Each structure stands twice: as structure tokens, then as C-alpha cells.
Amino acid sequence: MNLLIVDDEMIAIRGILDGVRWDRLPIDHVFTANSARQARAVLAKDRVDIILCDIEMAQEDGLSLICWIRENYEDMECIFITCHANFSFAQKAIQLQS
């Protein structure tokens, strides 16, 4: 199983990479991307089963990325991460998961 972490903050990606005991999970490979554009490039060349994506990013937010993923990779599991308290993001995320 492969995971893609998408966040425009490299420190957030590094925190996830360093803070998770990957050897205890059934994850074969962890890819990273700093933007929706980079995420699409990873998805074009590598199999990804789960995406861990920041909701609010520069240029293109995670909501639009996940909407695109739902249209192109319908079986992929999507998990949003955010440090923002804006509930409208959560509402949109829930709508995309259905």
C-alpha cells in the first residue's frame, strides 16, 4: 500500500514523516508533494492508495485536488489535514467524501 502526503508546508510533511512509526503500518512507500501540481505528477507515474492532503494550500487548495482525484481515481482513500478552524472547509471535505 502506498501513501501520498500533500502539503505546501515542508515542515508539516517532515513532521508526519518523522512522527509516524511507518514500520508498524502496512505502508510500502510514502510519496510527498508540496503542491496539487506535484501531487498530480506523482499520481501520473506511481500507484497511490491513500492520500493525506492539506485542505488549504497556495495556488490550489486540497479540496479541488481531491475533487479531481475523485473524478480520476475513485477508489483512492482521501484524508484531509488542516490546522485551520474554518468549518466551511470541513463541510466541503465531507461532501467530497460521499
Image: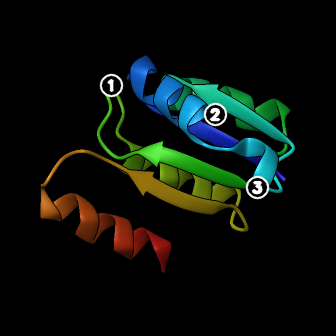
* Residue in view at x 26 percent, y 65 percent: 90
Give the labeled residue for mark 1: 59
Q: CA distance from mark 2 to mark 3?
A: 14 Å
Q: Is residue 2 left or right of residue 73?
A: right
41 or 82: nearer the viewer: 82
Say how many tags the image has.
3
Question: Which one is nearer the viewer's eye here, 8 or 95?
Answer: 8
Spatial separation of the CA atoms under disc 2 and disc 1: 14 Å
| Mark 1: amino acid | Gln
From the top left corner, tell me how far across and down residue 88 is, in percent: 16, 63
Q: Which class describes the residues within 10 Å of circle 2: few (<14), some (14-19), or many (20+)?
A: some
Residue under the point 36% across and 33% down = 60
Disc 3 target residue: 49
3 vs 1, front mark: 3
Rendered position, 79 above or below 4: below
Q: Residue visible at 51% across and 58% down? A: 79
Name the element at disc 3: loop
| Residue ID for mark 2 | 40
Q: Residue furthest left?
A: 86
Q: What residue occupies the far bottom of the structure in this picture?
A: 98
**Callout 1: 10 Å neighbours few (<14), some, many (20+)?**
few
Question: How busy is the neighbourhood of tag 3: few (under 14 within 10 Å), some, or many (20 plus)?
Answer: some
**Residue 56 x, y percent position in the rendering:** 29, 40
Residue placed farthest to the top in the image? Answer: 10
Q: As shown in the figure, which amino acid type bears the numbered disc 3?
A: Asp
The residue at 68%/44% (across/down) is: 21
Mark 2 touching mark 1, by CB under 8 A? Answer: no
